[in-house]
Structure formats: structure tokens, C-alpha cells
Image (spheres, rainbow, N blue to C red):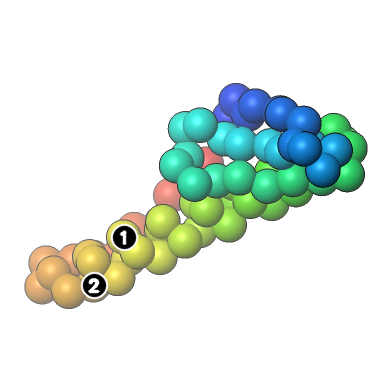
Amino acid sequence: MVFHVTLNRAEDDWIVAECPALPGCVSQGKDEQEALENIKEAITAWLWAEDQKAVATMSKMPEYQPIVVAV
């Protein structure tokens, strides 16, 4: 998957990385490279957390049959 991110320099000189497609998915780093590495981890964690919410909701449905799709 491909995501677009924004990089902005904070007042403390750290680089803040945000993924606008994933609300609240933000990270930072001491430099641009570290910020990009950290936002990749944040995106992975964000997607995992959303998937866990969906699984919890679906497991309450009697007709639920788990199907896993890798992308």
C-alpha cells in the first residue's frame, strides 16, 4: 500500500510526520529520515488497531465467518 504523508518542522526542531488519510496517525523524528521511518511504524500500528476494532465488531455477528486478505 502507498500512503502520502506530510512533513513539518516543529518549534523544537523535530520533524513531524502525518498521514492525512489515517486520522490521528502522526509521528516524529529528529530528522526527515527518522520521521519517515517512524510514520511507517505508526501507519502499520494504526491499520492493525483499526482491524482489531473491526474484528471485535464482526465477532458479535452470528453470521460472521473470518476471512483474512493480505495486501
- Relative to 38, say whether 32 is above or below: above
Asked if 39 appears above or below 54 in the picture, the reply is above
Q: Give residue 54's mark.
A: 1
**Circle 1 sits in a helix, a strand or a loop, which is it?**
helix
Residue 10 located left or right of residue 55 = right
What kind of residue is marked 2?
A: Ser
> Would you say 36 lies left or right of 18 here?
right
Picture coordinates of residue 11 (x, y %)? 77, 37
Place of residue 20 in the rendered image (x, y in percent of width and height, measured from the top left) = 51, 31
Position of residue 43 in the picture relative to residue 36 (left or right): left
User: Residue 59: which numbered mark, if any?
Assistant: 2
User: Residue at the location (85% across, 33% down)?
Assistant: 32
Q: Nearer the viewer, residue 52 or 12?
A: 12
Please say if the residues under marks 2 and 1 sit with CB atoms less than 8 Å apart: no
Q: Residue at x 65, y 27 (%)?
A: 6
| Cα–Cα span, label 2 and label 1 | 8 Å
The outermost residue toward the left is 62
Give 27 or 65, whichever is nearer the viewer: 27
Among numbered discs 2 and 1, the one appearing first in the sequence: 1
Disc nearest the viewer among 2 and 1: 1
Picture residue at 58% right of the left edge, 30% below the top: 3
- How packed is label 2: few (under 14 Cα within 10 Å), some, or many (20 or more)? few
The quarter holding residue 28 reads top right
Q: Nearer the viewer, residue 69 or 23?
A: 23
Q: Residue 42, image x and y in percent? A: 63, 51
Q: Amino acid at mark 1?
A: Ala
Q: Residue at image x 57%, y 35%?
A: 19
